[in-house]
Image (cartoon, rainbow, N blue to C red):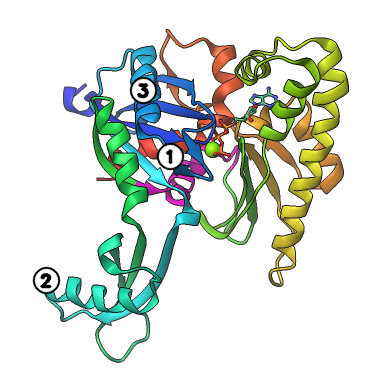
Amino acid sequence: MLSFLNKQEKGWVGIDIGSSSVKLVALSKRGKNLALDSYSVVPLPASAVIDSSVQDVGQVSEAIEKAVKLCSSSLKNAVTAVPSSAVISKKIELSSAFTEFELEDQIKLEADRFIPYPLDEVALDFEVLGPVENSTAEMNEIMLVACRRDDVEQREDAINGAGLKCEVVDVDRFSIERAYPLVLAEAATGSELVGLVDIGASTLTLNVFKNGEIVYNREQAFGGNDLSNVIHQQSGMPIAEVEHQLRSGELSEEILQTLVIPFRSTVSQQVSRALQFFYSSGPHNELSKLYLLGGTATIGGLADQLQAEVGVITETANPFVSMAVDSKINPSRLERDAPTLVKACGLALRCFEQ
Ligand SMILES: Nc1ncnc2c1ncn2[C@@H]1O[C@H](COP(=O)(O)OP(=O)(O)OP(=O)(O)O)[C@@H](O)[C@H]1O
Ligand SMILES: [Mg+2]
């Protein structure tokens, strides 16, 4: 076999900075085959990230440094993302005759019109999507993406402060789109609608896909923090210990029966609510399938309960099923953590797109 066909491409580390923890995923590629080399999840203090915004760069940096050590990854380059809710994106049409410099100036002019902050506080990016179909003049369709410079810089600083080099700050929804084909157990047909619902510590996000692209995205302020707080109040255990026991499955049978299992119904109601918002947003077909992502989605039996209550086939997401997995990774721990790693996985995939 020709050796270059089997050459291993090392990637960038995908870093998902959530409100409760930092998730790090390192992938590599041999030919077309992806491999999971390592991953880690490191809890964050409650004050580090609030409402998807980095409040304490130092605390986030420390967690990333710890996550890198746990992975014993030699990778030095990283990619992270700002939340979709912090981003304004808009498709515009501009003449294809502009040079690159002219295009940048035009884009700044356009951006100034619809962004509600002074442009010097804004990080701006764009992608030329291609010629506008059926247009008489030579026009290109351009996706313009803007967010507050602070949101980008705090994440970059946290990563660079941990000794890595932040190569790209992406947008959440693009990372989920990238990971989507890996999450699908079987390919969806062009017209099928598939939902991916991410239930984290403080936010529930419903993404609906059609033809591999997100056609609907909405966040709700809800997550596993509600459960952790109740367990903390009722048992007196410190929050960090509650979080540890939730993840490792060490909670007592009494807490499981009296607090965790009833919370499953609360989660189910919140997902139903998210679906109702989606169905009432336009004349949509029913979803053909629903995948659960995020730490709160790992509550035992949630997929079955949701399937029964909302009437849509529901599965817990695992983007690693068709990947080679490094022998150092514990398979049962990976199965438990996989739904929380979807975003970090989509971020790690970013560098193979270059
Ligand atoms: N087995 C479990 N049962 C119930 N809840 C769990 C379990 N494992 C983790 N969780 C909860 O999942 C949440 C963490 O999930 P995740 O890592 O996806 O959140 P995050 O990305 O940090 O938050 P967000 O996306 O909202 O900013 C915590 O609230 C934690 O208590
Ligand atoms: Mg999250």
Q: What's the residue at 39%, 19% (across, down)?
A: 67
Left-right relation of 260 to 340: right
- Where's ligand 2: which quadrant? top right
The answer to whether one can see residue 67 in this image is yes
* Crowding near the residue tagged with mark 3, few <14, some 14–19, many ≥20 C-alpha atoms within 10 Å: some
Q: Is residue 96 above or below residue 352?
A: below
Is 47 covered by the magenta stretch?
no
Q: Which residue is mark 1?
A: 55
* Magenta segment: 170-186
Q: CA distance from mark 2 to mark 3?
A: 39 Å
Q: What's the residue at 64%, 13% (across, down)?
A: 248
Asked if the residues shown at circle 2 and circle 1 are in contact, with their CB atoms under 8 angstroms apart, the answer is no
Residue type marked 1 = Gln
Secondary structure, magenta segment, majority class: helix
Q: Which residue is mark 2?
A: 101
Asked if the residues shown at circle 2 and circle 3 are in contact, with their CB atoms under 8 angstroms apart, the answer is no
